[in-house]
Image (cartoon, helix red, strand yellow):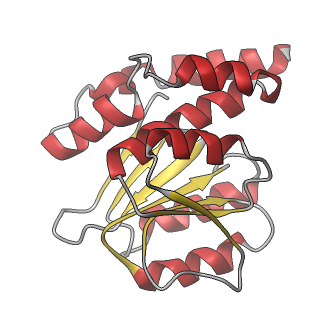
Amino acid sequence: MIKYHLKRIWNWLRRMGYSRGFGVQSPSAYRFIRYVLTEHYPYYAYSELGKKHKASGHEANKMGRLYFRLANDAQAECWYDYLSGSEIYADYVRSGCRTTVFEAMDSTSVPRHFRIARLSMRADYKTVYRRLVPVASNDSLLILEGINDNPDAKAFWHEVVESAEAVITYDLYACGIVQFDRSKYKHHYVVNF
């Protein structure tokens, strides 16, 4: 527990200059960082969901709140999820957008198109990523959770950032977010999440 808090403080201090969209020149990227990724306003369902999932821990609830805001912003028809392992994320996503269907996927059941998808960087995540990239459109958003969990995940995240398909990437330390909007210039943002 103490190790987790020390690591969190260290990462926060290291990324302090990247808080709340400071220095971001793109209006769309600034809006996304400021009002979706790092929004501190207590949304209507946070307290209820926090009480329901208190046993899941701080980090899971923090990621759940992020997914709530992403679902609320995207208003996607379907949220595809690879290896979430619990119902906490489904609850947060459904509360963020009541019309969104939370659908689990595996390496064999990749959708033909997606607006938003989340991959846990475990098991066969590289295969799933490589199957999702060709079906991504300009409005697709892909979340890679656990980009700093181990050296292999970290190396893969750097490959994703450097790839031509990933146009805009956001490094939140706990996860990485990829946007495929080919009308924008390639850019990588580090965000103090």
* Residue 35 against residue 123 in the figure, above or below: above
Residue at image x 71%, y 86%?
108
Apparent side of residue 149 relative to residue 12 in the rendered image (left or right): right
Q: Is residue 143 above or below residue 15?
A: below
Task: Decide which of 18, 82 is in the foreground and name it.
Answer: 82
In this view, 56 is above or below 84: above
Query: x, y (%) of residue 149?
Result: 74, 47
Q: Quadrant of the N terminus?
A: top right
Task: Give the x, y percent position of residue 162.
Answer: 43, 66
User: Horizontal and vertical percent for residue 178?
Assistant: 42, 59
Q: Is residue 184 left or right of residue 90?
A: left
Q: In the figure, is residue 193 to the left or right of 110?
A: left
In percent of width and height, residue 164 lies at 36, 75
Residue at image point 47% right, 56% down: 100
Give the camera-side residue of 80 and 28. Answer: 80
Compare residues 162 and 49 and report the one nearer the observer: 49
At 22% from the left and 36% from the top, the residue drawn is 31
Residue 26 in view here? no
Whether residue 11 sits left or right of residue 55 in the image: it is: left
* Front residue (pair 170, 31): 31
Residue extending furthest front?
Answer: 99
What is the quadrant of residue 137 in the picture?
A: bottom left
Among the 4 quarters of the image, the one containing residue 18? top left
